[in-house]
Amino acid sequence: MKRLPIMNRIKKQMKKLLIYSSLAAVIPTLFSGCATRGRVITTGGNESIVSVDQVNIQDYMQAAETMINSLLESDALDRVPNPPALMAISRVENRTGVQVETDLLTKKIRIALNKSGKVITRMNFGVGADGKPLTEDPAGKVIDDLGQFGSDAKTTRLPDFTLSGKIIQTRARAGNTHQSTFSFQLSLARGNNAVWEDEKEITKQGSRSAVGF
Amino acid sequence: MKNQIVQTACGFGLLVGLASICGCGTPMNSVERAQPAGQREMVDDKRVLTDASLDVRARIVGVNQAVTAGGLLKVQVELFNKSRYQKRFNYLWEWFDQAGMQVTTPATDVLIPVVIEGKESRFISGVAPNPRCNDFRLKLIRGK
């Protein structure tokens, strides 16, 4: 007679154990559906993260696209005595409150202009972001220096154009809503004279970062 | 009587809900020269429409082309938002050379977001990456 309650207890405990173990198995499965697993997305695609207070990769890409199209559309690059034009990259100032890698903008422009056949970029020329002379390719510089030393011609071709610019951030806030406008300004100059200029503004608004645009 | 009030309230709520889903109502008026001075060189186009909703928010009106001073092909597409509401979409250009091979640069394959107002007509344009490119494709993707 006394055994029955004990058996019932055991049965109850077994039932509890079964319920808890199945819950333990089901709950993580349910939540794993909601959590995002690491995956590869298209760079700059519409699944990219949009940060209000930062320059995202898609912003660099969109700014570069605008600048490249504007530069190619203008005939500024074609007005040189010996095409293709020789261009040097000058300084692109960061006037934002965040760290900006200006090469993400200028390199895209260099690649596209080079592929267009209209421009050759002069390396190891100009001033870096730290104010020091820019040496992108030290080995190339040595070869160039040696070539000049050995030849009778004492002058090398100077760049036809220099590319410079600024990235400026303008902030605004209303309650919890933040807004940032990043202005990408670029100038192509022949000496002190700007022969082409353009600007691309990207405005982002929201209370927090989001996925997709 | 009470039922009528409840039904009216429900109907109103449904309308407000639908309006909030559809977005802001911002239809647009515009004015332009009756007889445009410039002549567009229109392009015979082939369209592949798989998203009916996108065709409402960014209806392709026409495609025209020109050659830049530097000898590059420039293509312009006119899009029209048929709805009364502000919509979002993205676009990207693809360029092809004379052999039909795709030419890529950092200026191609870049998804550009566009916000278009209700009943707004908008132009988007692209410039070929080099003088050898003479074919193009514009891709339109619904925005999030």
Image (spheres, grey):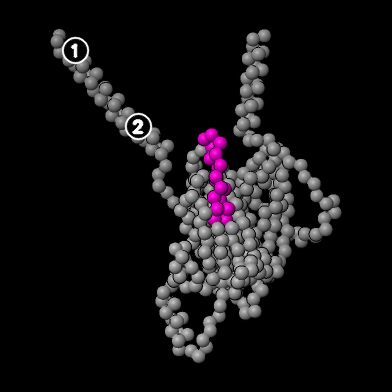
**Crowdedness near tag 2: few (<14), some (14–19) or many (≥20) residues, C-alpha within 10 Å:** few
Q: Is residue A171 inside the magenta stretch?
A: yes
Closer mark to the observer between disc 1 and disc 2 = 2
Residue B86 image-quadrant placement: top right
Instruction: Please provide percent x and percent y for residue A147.
Output: 46, 85
What's the CA distance linking mark 1 and mark 2?
31 Å
**Label 1 is placed on what type of residue?**
Pro
Identify the residue under disc 1: A5
Question: In terms of secondary structure, what is the magenta stretch mainly?
Answer: strand
Instruction: Please provide percent x and percent y for residue B73.
Output: 68, 65
Extreme residue toward the bottom, this view: A152
Determine whether the residue tagged by mark 1 lies in a helix, strand or loop.
helix
**Crowdedness near tag 1: few (<14), some (14–19) or many (≥20) residues, C-alpha within 10 Å:** few
Query: Start and end of the magenta stretch?
Result: A167-184
Eyeballing the image, is A66 above or below B122? below
- The lab-note entry on whether marks 1 and 2 share a chain reads yes
Instruction: Please provide percent x and percent y for residue B48.
Output: 65, 52
- Residue that appears at 56% across and 78% down: A158
Seen from the viewer's position, the closer of residues A155 and B21 is A155
